[in-house]
Image (cartoon, rainbow, N blue to C red):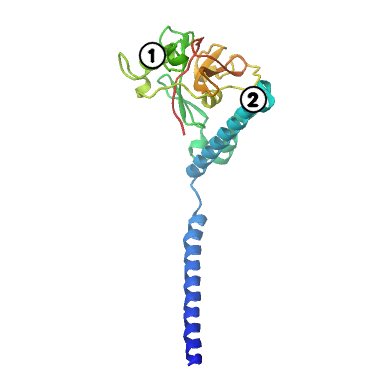
Amino acid sequence: MKTGIRMVMATIMTMRRCERIWVAMTVVVVFGSASSAGATAEQACQNGRYLAAAKYAACEQRATGTQFSGGFSNFQGAVSKCRAKYTAAWIKLQAKGGGTGSTCDQPRLDDNGDGTVTDRLTGLQWERKTDDGSVHDKDNLYTWSAGGAGFAAADGTVFTSMLAVLNGTGGGCFGGHCDWRLPTRGELQTILAEAYPCALSPCIDAGAFGPTVPDDYWAATTNALNASNAWSVDFTDGFVSNGTKSDVGYARAVRGGL
């Protein structure tokens, strides 16, 4: 009786081992074939873009923390390194994508011919500035807030005048898109031409982005510790700061992103 039971148990164990081996072989075949196939050049390019963006976002958050641990001057150096590493990532992606015809096998900035510029690294589409007295004129100044809710409300002229016009008030939408907005603090820094402090002033590729006043440009990002203040980026030298939302500053619209 015992011998019979042992034989049955041995048979069951053998069947289970075979089952496990079959499953393992199936996994190897399925995943092995997928990995051996490899990614296309475009997939590799997009993967690299997203990884670079993720590193930049994390780096900027860490840099923000240095305001509290090391002061505002330490923050400038830290956040500058973040954006320098991020923008330098495109050169590496271009080198890997060279000759493949992928997105990374292209210049970083693309003039769309309609008053906008697309950044292939960030995926953002930017407004080109002009010197023609229009809503795109480089000399137009705007407030972030009109004073509502303790200057916290997004009801200043940058929203009611500039963005409202770009998004179709009184006519068609700019560049065929109706989702223009202010860039975040991190986004606005990505179009600075150099690390802080910039030797070039204005600190931007004016050939791509149009005439630019070397001064503070509003970001959409509110100061977490003071809702009446919003962040800005100075295109004189790349200095990142924040000021009262009722102050006047310059603005450049953006849309899209990763």
What's the amino acid at mark 1? Thr
* Mark 1: few/some/many CA within 10 Å (<14, 14-19, 20+): some
- Asked whether the viewer can see residue 144, the reply is no
Viewer-nearest residue: 60 or 251: 60
Q: Which mark is residue 130?
A: none
Instruction: Note whether residue 23 is visible.
Output: yes
The structure residue drawn at horizontal position 49% and vertical position 14%, both measured from the top left corner, is 245
Q: Is residue 72 left or right of residue 155?
A: right
Q: Which mark is residue 160?
A: 1
Percent x, y of residue 257: 46, 31
Q: Residue at x 53, y 24 (%)?
A: 224
Rendered image: mark on residue 67: 2
* Mark 1–mark 2 CB contact (< 8 Å): no
Residue 87 lies, in percent from the top left, at 58, 30
Answer above or below: position of 123 versus 199. Answer: below
Q: Residue furthest top?
A: 133
Residue 68 on image: x %, y %: 65, 26
Direction from residue 114 to residue 59 in the image, left or right: right
Q: Secondary structure at mark 2?
A: helix
| Category of crowding for the residue at label 2, using alpha-carbon neighbours closer than 10 angstroms: few (below 14), some (14–19), many (at least 20) | some
Q: Nearer the viewer, residue 150 or 159?
A: 150
Depth check, front residue: 120 or 19: 19
Circle nearer the N terminus (1, 2)? 2
Residue 93 shown left or right of residue 178 in the figure: right
Judge whether 183 appears above or below 20 on screen.
above
Spatial CA distance of label 1 from label 2 is: 32 Å
Question: Residue 231 lies in what quarter of the image?
Answer: top right
Badge nearest the viewer, 1 or 2: 2
Provide the secondary structure element on which disc 1 rests: helix
- Which residue is nearer to you in this view: 217 or 199? 217
- Name which residue type carries label 2: Gln
